[in-house]
Image (cartoon, coloured by chain):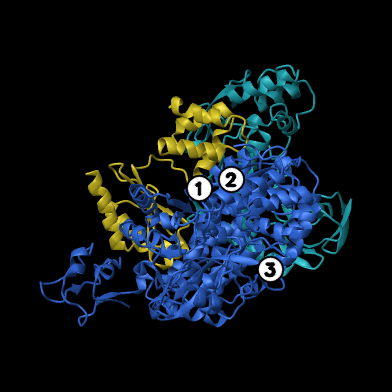
Chain colours: A blue, B cyan, C yellow
Amino acid sequence: MKTLKSAEELEVRREQIAGAGHREGASVAVCCGTGCSASGAREVVAAFEEQLLQRELEVPVLTRITGCHGFCEQGPLVVVEPGNIFYCRVEPEDVPEIIERTVLGAEAVERLLYVDPVSGEPVQQEAEVPFYRGQKRLTLGWNGQISPHRIEDYVGVGGYRALAGALGSLSPEQVIANIKESGLRGRGGGGFPAGRKWELCRRATGEPKYLICNADEGDPGCFQDRSLLEGNPHLVIEGAIIAAYAVGAAKGFIYVRNEYPLAVEHAGIALVQAREWGLLGEDILGSGFDFELQLTRGGGAFVCGEETALISSIEGLSGEPNPRPRPPYPVEKGLWGKPTLINNVKTLAAVPLITERGGAWYGQIGTAASKGTMIFSLTGKVNNTGLVEVPMGMTLQQLIYEIGGGIPGGKEFKAVQTGGPAGGCLPASKLDLPLDYEKLTEAGSIMGSGGMIVMDERTCMVDVARYFLSFTVDESCGKCTPCREGGRQMMAYLDEITAGRGKPEYLERLRELAAAMQAGSLCALGRLAPNPVLTTLRYFEDEYRVHIEERRCPAGVCKELITYSIDEEACTACRRCNRHCPTGAISGPKKEVPRLDPELCIRCGICRDVCRFDAIVVQ
Amino acid sequence: MIEVKIDGQRVAVAAGTTILAAARRLGLEIPTLCHHEALEPFGACRLCLVALDEGGRQSIVAACNYPLERSGLSVETGTPAVWQARKMSLKLLLARCPGVKVLQDLARQWRVDTADLLLTGDGEEECILCGLCVRVCREVIGKNAISFVYRGAERKVSTPFDAETDLCLGCAACAYLCPTGAIKVREEAGRLLIDRWHSDLEQALCSECGRPVVPAELLVQMREKAAEEGVPGEELLCLRCRRMRAAAAATALPVPQYGPADSFPARRSSREEPDVNQARKGK
Amino acid sequence: MRKQVDPIIDRYRGDRTAIVAILHEINAAFRYLPREALERVSEQLSIPLSHLYSAATFYRSFDLEPCGEHEIQVCLGTACHVRGSELILDALSRRLGIKPGETTADSKYTLKRVNCLGACALGPLVSIDRDYHGHLTAHQAERLLEAYEDEDA
């Protein structure tokens, strides 16, 4: 592959690809993101490849692998031309029929189409699926169209054009001015204006400057960074190069979570390609700008998402990551004491588009202070789970009901947790809340990294608070007293409450400890860790009180406060529960409703899993 | 130079001076447990919290490692919010290490008790994770014999693989700086033992009385260093014999470098104490 | 030991940022971090052993005891949690007779909890040797394990 030496050469290459890549007739695109792969997408790809080959077609039909579409719940997802027909939950057994009827016959296989749960009608095109209809997929949109392994695909849809434009005709100051005008704010949690951060880094003294792409997506329940880096790594790389040009960074790191093997692999391949094409390294596109970018794997530590801990993790100096207070800010003194720009994957992914289409254009999207789109991981007790990219300012209601399709099983919405372990739980009364940085903060939560976990009446809010706190306690580095010791003490109170041994004054103790952690912790992990406890106390104090005063878990979750029993009406005495009970708690003569001994029952839930008649009751 | 206000008093300091250093210049008392002048600031114990006002934006920060970068900043060292946060830090440390005297004393003084906390230690734990030992071993001695291991509630200070390490020379600088007495150094049958680090070291003997004076390997390394710097090697004497000779020669007693003279008399002569500045330069 | 460790060390000579990367490779090669391997790294690259041990114990990706042939990770991310992943962890733990973080006596299985595998739409999720199995119930998790046991038998 010949190295590209100018923007013109890139354009010529793009035209070549677009010309060659335009296939008359048929093609099959299979999503092979982590979600779809887990659901068997690789087998589907293999089946297509093998069977299409066997057919010995006159015009060969290409089987393409694409990045994550974000609708993981319905995977494996397949898009077939002609007709751009969108199939869900495809299995290898479905492949012959798809080839026969859609690839060759140009008609849809109805049973594999997505069925709109509201209208009950099958939907043929991906864009018409209600999950996608309300979205504005500015950054995620390409994932489903290109193969993450092929730089040609990315260049073919206009990739690296923004970079070429910036290097060719914009000064670094102009690139920064554009980002400032767009109003883009940090998408990793802080929400700090990106243009301002770039400007501070540009003006900081010290050489060389560094850039870090923070892909250490640690928030449990978030996977947008994974999806972007895995599904469209060149988008992130292009954003990083533009950012490096703007601030004058000579070297950069993409710090990826080790728990994302596919993202590590795809980003690694993409970096090699970008180097081969002359988009990284010396004299990028003949502009005289040099920038080197390398991949660094995290070691499995949430605290490394925090900028100063991330820096010390890359430096590797004392082995453990070591968060330190700010100032000095990393833009002034970061990696090895040099000015360092740290941006989240989502922030950098928005950069090529803003650079190409202009800050003013991006600034029109969203609300007054929160511009553009945000990608949320919509998960939990919601019908359509997956990645959702929407304009800022959309309400929770719209997101959960119109895009998410509401709560499954006709259950009642109870709460939504935004912002991951540093965020908070919002109740039904906040469903009208528009999603922007300030509004979420006012309500006691945060935008954070875009986690959005929906909870229904079967979710216990005390358990959720305990879950998040146990996460941050587990992930605390242990350096400062309030976070290490305070978190542990808070856990003890929550353990007691969920075990039915709570006392009314415990709620006050929790609030005191939370206040101390917020005020006194060294880094953001500790300062934000109490948020889930505080918001559940604020909006769901009644539920805590029921646990304490009535020794009862209304949602039926807290193990020590629930009992299992058998509904004699519903039970058919099939004895399935009896056979599977791991402790012998279920017994009794044949053809009779078995007895469940509460003393032996360990509330493992297996009887409820295996019962085909909904006869196991949890109270 | 920049000018800031601390507790209403104006003070001019060089940009980058920490709040703690600036406050001490004014004679203001700020409590610390993990701070030492000779070491990099760490910010772990959170006893030195103060209230910072940056042109209206208020926050609680640790005085020991917050650098004052520009004029106009205002610091209050004793607001109710500051005391609330400090007391909670102390309370949490006391709950972890109820047997530690320095914490008990502060708690009495600040009227803090741990009665309403659910988790209180049994008194076994004496380490408050201030990291002075780790840092002195790294920054001053340059040996890195110990480090923080594990994380969160399991965090502790230990040697690699929690086993004996030949990097520990027995200089006992860690024990000397430890504010809680968690690191115990003892002598047994002529050997120096630091149980916490699994160190069991042979001692060199006083050429006069034959008493063990200093770990042999430490002596070797100190003499090497002295030789490099052109300082002639000296006969090894314990403090008592040295004093006797000195008295006999009617010259002044060597002045102990720091600390009370009763803790480790054997290694308290000024010649043998590793020189802070030299060690740092040599790193 | 040296035959396996030295090439890894050589790849990272002069790279200041390499501690975590080196530990990843050693952990992958030995299925844990043998003490002798870390001592070799320390000696060859002049990285204090205490720093290597600090990183080895701090980060969750590393093992200080040999892992079993199969690595079972139970995702405890939020989406998995609200859909009952604790029950799955309990079931596997009971079934294998080990606690999370431990390895079975026959060195076949290591059970781990992981804070999020990032396939949240598929929760509750278990990965065995990096193959993901989604939408599990406690019962199905037991069956999944049986399938592995049968294969090995």
Q: Secondary structure at mark 3?
A: loop
The residue closer to the viewer here, B187 or A507, is A507
Q: Residue at x 58, y 81 (%)?
A: A432
Q: Which of the numbered marks, if any, corresponds to residue A258?
A: 1
Q: Amino acid at mark 2?
A: Gly
Chain containing mark 1: A
Q: Secondary structure at mark 1?
A: loop
Q: State how far apart marks 1 and 3 are (Cα).
A: 31 Å
Q: State how far apart marks 1 and 2 are (Cα).
A: 40 Å
Where is residue A138? Give x, y as percent: 61, 63
Q: Is residue A247 above or below residue C136?
A: above
The residue that mark 2 highlights is B181
Q: Is residue A590 left or right of residue A374?
A: left
Q: Which of the marked residues, 1 or 3, is nearer the chain's N terminus?
A: 1
Q: Is residue A194 above or below residue A542?
A: above
Q: Which of the numbered marks, if any, corresponds to residue B153?
A: none
The residue that mark 3 highlights is A371
Chain containing mark 2: B
Is residue B43 among what the camera can see? no
Q: Nearer the viewer, mark 1 or mark 2?
A: 1
Q: Residues within 10 Å of mark 1 (few under 14, many from 20)?
A: many
Q: Amino acid at mark 1?
A: Asn
Q: Residues within 10 Å of mark 2 (few under 14, many from 20)?
A: some
Where is residue A421? Give x, y as percent: 54, 63
The C terminus of chain A - image quarter: bottom left
Q: Residue at x 59, y 59 (%)?
A: A525
The N terminus of chain A - image quarter: top right
Q: Is residue A542 left or right of residue A362?
A: left
The residue closer to the viewer here, A253 or B249, is A253
Q: Nearer the viewer, mark 2 or mark 3?
A: 3
Where is residue A488? Give x, y as percent: 51, 60
The lab-note entry on whether marks 2 and 3 share a chain reads: no
